[in-house]
Amino acid sequence: MRAVSDIIHKGGEIKEIRTKRLSVIVSAIYTMLTVSNVSRVFESDTGMVEALRDINLEVSDKEFVCFIGPSGCGKTTFLRIIAGLDHPTSGEVLLDGVAIRSPDPERGMVFQEYSLFPWRTILDNIAFGLEIKGVPKAERHDIAQKYLELVGLGAFERNYPYELSGGMRQRVAIARALANDPKVLLMDEPFGSIDAQTRNVLQGELLKIWQKDRKTVLFITHSIDEAVYLADRVVVLSARPGQIRSIIEIDLERPRIRTSVEVNVIRERLLGLLGEARAQECGETICWTGVAAGTD
């Protein structure tokens, strides 16, 4: 795998900038999710709003992919399309070769808000999806307890959401999504409303869970540091209409040292790309990082 490889989509071509060593790519990894020419246009009182344009992407099994981009660039819309909660105006999304038409337990969703049922205990919140699927009570409680232990909350199964901190409630939301054994875990800024210290802790816990469970993860964030710390690849979207501006592969050992030279090289590259996107949106010639747009 590449230590750092920047794959930039320009004019339909792929430009690859290699900054570190190459090694053998494991051929056993297969493409689980395929996004082909996906666009999304909304109708509004003021006219048509183009949210996404011609998104093409392949995601491998067990891959952790983060998405960053300017506010309003269609990141959440993209995730909702993959979840089956929204439909593309054109194009299609395939999961294991089957077109996504509607929500399905194969795709678990974790929102920025915890979305827990306040009248249910923590254990029953996690078991909710299994209950809907008709899993017997004893079995679903065993499964829920397993994932409660996985997120480090095994002693809180009888508590209610209001008795837990924000970080703990988000861990419950993650456990609930995992309990349904989805093929893909979709996470829409799950740590966006949590304080910085707790956020760092949850990022580390999420990686531990991912390394044990090895789900394919699609993770939206506004934090470049978070993306670099978590992802195998970072997809950078342009300003609306959202298009894939570039994809950066990160092949650094985990857990990553947030202050290392390698991490900061990638971080600065992403800052530059986002700055270019903002300059393009605002018609500026100098991006918000202070670097001339279009330079490395």
Image: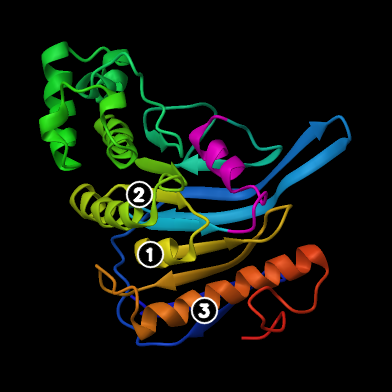
Q: Compared with residue 46, is residue 32 higher up or lower down, i.e. above or below?
A: below
Task: From the image, state whether disc 3 or disc 2 is nearer to you.
Answer: 3
Task: From the image, state whether disc 3 or disc 1 is nearer to you.
Answer: 3
Q: Compared with residue 200, is residue 110 higher up or lower down, i.e. above or below?
A: above
Circles 3, 2 touching at the beta carbon (< 8 Å)? no
The residue that appears at 64% across and 58% down in the rendered structure is: 70
Q: Compared with residue 183, is residue 216 higher up or lower down, i.e. above or below?
A: below
Quarter holding the N terminus? Answer: bottom left
Quarter holding the C terminus? Answer: bottom right
* Kind of element beneath mark 3: helix
According to the picture, the residue beneath numbered tag 3 turns out to be 268
Determine the residue located farthest toward the right in the rendered image. Answer: 46
According to the picture, the residue beneath numbered tag 1 turns out to be 232
According to the picture, the residue beneath numbered tag 2 turns out to be 216
Q: State the residue in front, 65 or 110.
A: 110
The residue that appears at 36% across and 25% down in the rendered structure is: 116
The residue that appears at 29% across and 37% down in the rendered structure is: 165
Whole-percent x, y for residue 189 in the image: 47, 47
Quadrant assignment, res 292: bottom right
Three-letter amino acid code at disc 1? Asp
Whole-percent x, y for residue 18 in the image: 46, 85
- Write down the region rendered in magenta: 69-85
Is 36 on the left or on the right of 279, as rendered?
left
